[in-house]
Amino acid sequence: MTTKHRTPSHADRLFAAGLAAHQAGRLEDAFAQYEAALQKQPRHFDSLHHVGILGYQIGNHELALQFMSDAINVNPGVSAVYSNLGNIFKAIGDFPAALQSYEQALGLDKKNVDALYNRGNVLQAQKRYEEALASYRRALALAPRDIAAWNNCAVVLQSLKRFEDALAACEKALKLDPTHLEALDNRGNIYMALRRADDALASYDRAIALQPAYVKVRINRAKALRLLGALDDALDVYDAMLEEELDPLDAAEAHHGRGNVLRHMRRAQDALDAYQQAVLLAPKSAQLRASLGHMMNDIGHLESALRCFDVSISLDPDLPASHNGRGIVLQRLRRREEAMLAYERALEVDPEFTDALLNRGNVLQDMGRAEEALAVYDEVLALKGDSPATWNNRGNVYEALRRYEDALHCFDRSLEIDPEYAPAHWNRALLNLQYGALLEGWRGYEWRWNNELLSVYNEQRDFEQPLWLGQEPLEGKTILLFAEQGLGDTLQFCRYVPLVAALGARVVLEVQPPLVGLLASLGGTARILAKGEALPEFDFQCPLMSLPLAFGTEVDTIPAPRRYLAPDAARLAAWQERLGTATRPRVGLVWSGNMQHANDHNRSIQFAQLAPLLALDCEFYSLQKEYRAADMAALDASVVRRMDAHLNDFADTAALCEQMDLVIAVDTSVAHLAAALGRPVWVLLPHVADWRWLTGREDSPWYPGVRLLRQPARGDWAGALAEAARALAAL
């Protein structure tokens, strides 16, 4: 029996010529031949199908859809046509239609590997990772040497945080082709997720050796360098890339990576500029908006940060980091209930997003719900295993509960897991300082330079001159002492300057500009500079907050002269004339500080709460320069005299403090100023106060003239103010 063969038609021959041109990459010739075939035979299935394929390849999706649909009308029983139709829908972002097409393709041929593979790609794009993995695995069961499927399997497994399985899938792809660039890049990404930065770097370097211009891998290589601490090298990679002609999205990613490095280097303004440039190049990127939001939060621009996170969420509602970042900002704005909702939304998107879970515990702690916070941290430990961050946060809860031993155990456990974990070193130091173990506390306090959470506020200077911590002789040497934190810190620790001078040193003191005039009265300085002025030559350098360590300060060796600062005589006379003769006791008041201070929600008081004090027969003066809008009506209606119009700098504030018989202040720079002037000062403190006021004391070893009035219980300012009113009435 013989088989009868159909004689090729003229249209078939034209199609065959077109297919040959198509396969050779001569797309215009191919299109001409296909078009000629369709002129001869308008319902020529293969020509309709391949014009659809060609339209997809050149990005003319309207043409592709039209001809693919015409091909299906001619012959609805060909699996490959539906598979290619799905690819067109995938390209235009119509994922439901793409999935429907792939299902139709598989309904006709369940062994259609291309349909299974591309179906997996669409499911992956929709973050339906388990379904995507199942689709890739079905493809691999039919085509076990499909390198792209193995590589995409690895990507999905990484998204599912199954890193070891992801690595195994990646290795299978590379065993089939050791030069596969995407698999080498992907393997590096998996190593990064496993915190194996050296292995990641090796994988990236292999890819770059094969393709030196591979932008994506170069960006990832720079990320590995950053993780390894090679910040200058990482910055060089990004800078070199940005000198090239890059695609805008690649350039945006390079600026983004550069911003991450600069943020880690504590170059806040440069980092901000880099993030802003990245967003300009890729305004639709939710991730870049989120990074800009984190940077805005770092520098205290909270409303701008909130807007960044809101835009990020509008671009991608399923990015958990954006909801988490929004919660962080809302928490700093004291909008705690909203912060809680933001963290819960992040956890809805990713139930294992432990940063949000940790932050949920933090906001519960801020709300005074300590037991619930501990339960959250236990949940994190159960979910993620031992984590230095979790033990550190548990320690913070116990510290707030005044359970010193439990807090110390948590910080120690955190450091057992990661001896280099800076936040635990920092919090352990604050705990020891708070409970009077000062020398151990000062040693741990040096970890402030390594704590990224504090890097924006504690500026580590890059000096060639050696750091002095009390070891080297200073006779005949010049030492630079410089302010590093807030105004109150400078006022408290400038007391060490005369001690340094007594060692034979010539002391150059650099401080914040508002303090320059006031600190002229401080003994032991050869020269006082405002930060930003040119520095003279010097032999050693030391930040003010490291001087207690340099002098081995314990509680009983704190240098505590009753008065170590004095007001300027001319300003003092001017203020005496301005205020006139006192007829009643003069009381200076400070009830709120800088809203950007991390602990301001605990230390500041609403003005209306001062009513028990203001009922007493005294002259009350506000020593503040700035006020909150919520306080203005009550302040304007009160007996308190405002002096802010006359306060130009701290030298003016010092002269005003000198006129007071008593200063009553929350924990702010003015409290330190008045105490350094030797004035009687009552400091109103939260139940768990800053470390410098120690624990359980009514006096301060730092300031002989200070009395401490603490909240009897968390948030109980009424109790502290009632005690202040009783004491003031007794005076």
Image: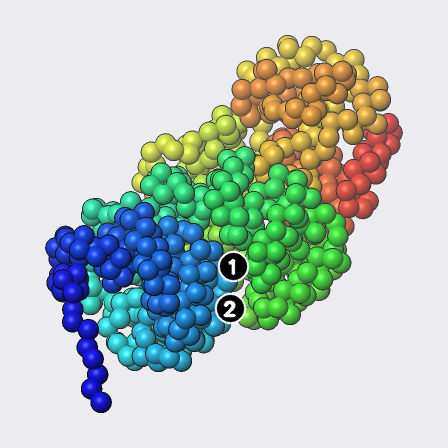
Q: Which residue is mark 2?
A: 130
Front residue of 213 and 255? 213
x and y, in percent, of residue 215 in the image: 26, 56
Question: Would residue 366 be seen by someone viewing this image from the given angle?
Answer: yes
Q: Are marks 1 and 2 in contact (CB under 8 Å)?
A: no
Relative to 353, is 245 on the left or the right? left
Front residue of 385 and 228? 385
**Above or below, 541 relative to 707:** below
Instruction: Indicate which disc, 1 or 2, sits on the residue closer to the N terminus.
Output: 2
What's the residue at 59%, 12% (across, down)?
574
Front residue of 561 and 91? 91
For residue 482, which quarter of the picture? top left
Q: Which residue is mark 1?
A: 422
Foreground mark, 1 or 2, reads 2
What's the residue at 30%, 53% (across, down)?
67
x and y, in percent, of residue 624 in the image: 64, 25
What's the residue at 73%, 41% (across, down)?
685
> In which quadrant of the rendered image does the N terminus lie?
bottom left
What's the residue at 73%, 30% (across, down)?
606
Relative to 176, is 330 on the left or the right? right
Q: Amino acid at mark 1?
A: Ala
For residue 630, which quarter of the picture? top right
Q: Amino acid at mark 2?
A: Glu
x and y, in percent, of residue 377 in the image: 66, 62
Q: Please rate how many residues cluster around mark 2, counting C-alpha atoms within 10 Å: few if below 14, some from 14 to 19, many from 20.
A: some
